[in-house]
Amino acid sequence: MTGTEEYAGLLLRADEWRGRAFTGMSVAVLAPGREAAVIVPEVARTAREVKVFQEEPDWLVPWPVPLPGPLRRPAARLHLRLAVKDPWIRRRLTPDGRFNTRRPRVDGRYYAALQQDGCTLISWPIYAFVPEGVRSAEGIEHHVDCVILGAASVHAAPSIPAQREESCA
Amino acid sequence: MSTTFDYDFDAMLQTIKDKQWSLADIDWDAPGAETMTDELRAKMQPFMADLVWIEHVGARGFASLAKKAPTPTIKRIYEYFHAEEQKHANAELALMKRWGMLGEDGKAPEPNINVKLAIKVLDDYGDTLPLTGLATLIPLLECALDGALVKFLLDEVSDPVCHEVFRHINSDEARHITVDFKVLELIGAGPLHKLLIESIALLQPQVVLGLIVVFTPLINKMRDNIVAMGLPEQKLYNAVKRFTTIGSRGDYTSRIPAYHVLRAQAAMVIDRTSPYHRLLADPMVRLTSFIPAKVLGKPQAWVEELTHEPIAS
Ligand SMILES: [Fe+2]
Ligand SMILES: [Fe+2]
């Protein structure tokens, strides 16, 4: 895995994306659902193109209505169902209830932003950074002007331990 | 989980991450494309189209497996395999492009009706099929793909770029097959009552019907196509034998009823004299050829995700 230092474009970490305009730029957002939900609607307002490399999806509810525990998930599921018509996009936004036990977070803008023109949801794992962008496991290199690395992204960890010895296949 | 079966899936996940490759690593304009003669092109075009779609449908199969994976690590491995199968389809599409097998628009060839049926079933039922069913079906298909189809292609085509691409693909596939069978061991080592419940779930009419209407003709059509093209039946036989051999090497795989059912079906598929063909498979190929694609409705958006372009900007 080549690290973020390989990337030659504008790299914004954690909150550095706030208060910026991305006019004319193509931007990759690397973050889990709960964080992408905060970043993407803001960035999509000005950017020419946003590629959302969403890591683990999370449940979202549109309003801060106090709901008893057992009703939170169904409410989030209903929100997703109503906000996203395309079943393939919806599938990739649905958390795996067995391993993701986080409470739904309040956000009413992410799903709409994802479906606006110029915004694409990509769920392939990213495995390397290159000078022009990122490489993901479906074999494609994605070139972008700016990479936003969410604080909760799997790539935000300081540095990945040195590469293992090539093991024999 | 009470199991005496032990395999380091975390180490495998790390290896998978370390071995990633990209279409951008390949020089698609390197010399060798001229080895694809007009005659060979005409013969291989439908084969490559089928191959691209099998990889792509296989990718969708791994997406469903990810939803059922018994642990987060295995889930992550399946997510990588989902992407890798898509990468294989993309790379094979890029080979088709290199060989002048795609139209002006560079779009993926239209899938045949049997592939369309498989897409429909995966869209509608893929995520609800019990784990043991898909987890057994996929290694059988991978053995066939790896052992027969890909070897056939490499025997027929001498283009060095094709051989380079398939060195990557085969190295991925070796890991797929390893994990496929390790997961079968893990499932087989689980409690018997769970195996029985899952097996009974596999006997639901819509699942059995799905397998008969969709996968029987899909596999038979491919089988006859490639045998007609000159693939020795011995290769198919070896591929299925590999499924049996690796399966029986494990201690627990044989406890999975679905494994025995598929093994028996596979044995009938390769034996053209078996009544299976006369009574079931051949009529199914004929029947499904009358299905108008329109009744299947619009497939989900994943079928449009293929690309032969190494770089997206
Ligand atoms: Fe593959
Ligand atoms: Fe595979």
Image (cartoon, rainbow, N blue to C red):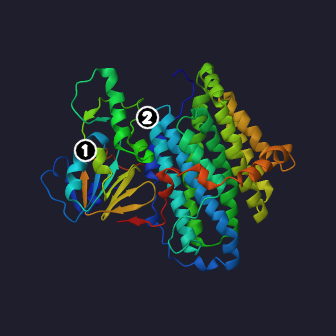
Classify 10 Å Cα crowding around label 2: few (below 14), some (14-19), many (20 and above): some
Q: Which chain contains the residue that carries disc 1?
A: A
Q: Is B214 on the left or on the right of A96, as rendered?
A: right
Classify 10 Å Cα crowding around label 1: few (below 14), some (14-19), many (20 and above): some
Q: Can residue A101 be seen in this view?
A: no
Q: Nearer the viewer, residue B265 or A166?
A: B265
Residue type for callout 1: Arg
**Beta carbon at label 1 within 8 Å of ligand 1:** no
Q: Is B257 on the left or on the right of A164, as rendered?
A: right
Residue type for callout 2: Pro
Q: Can residue B247 be seen in this view?
A: yes
Image coordinates for residue A136, horizontal then vertical, percent? 40, 55
Q: Is residue A154 above or below residue B98?
A: above
Front of the two marks 1 and 2 = 1
Image coordinates for residue A63, horizontal then vertical, percent? 23, 34
Tell me the residue at 80%/54% (across/down). B234
Q: How far apart are marks 1 and 2 (CA)?
A: 29 Å
Q: Which chain contains the residue that carries disc 2?
A: B
Q: Is B57 on the left or on the right of B247, as rendered?
A: left
**Residue lying farthest left?**
A19
Q: Is residue A74 above or below residue B222?
A: above
Q: Mark 2 points at which residue?
A: B72
Tell me the residue at 36%/39% (across/down). A82
Q: Is mark 2 on a helix, strand or loop?
A: helix
Image coordinates for residue B147, horizontal then vertical, percent? 68, 53
Q: In this view, does A161 lie above or below B113?
A: above
Q: Is residue B144 above or below residue A62?
A: below
Q: Nearer the viewer, residue B84 or B8?
A: B84
Q: Is mark 1 on a helix, strand or loop?
A: loop
| Badge 1 and badge 2 in a common chain | no
Q: Mark 1 points at which residue?
A: A109
Tell me the residue at 25%/40% (across/down). A108
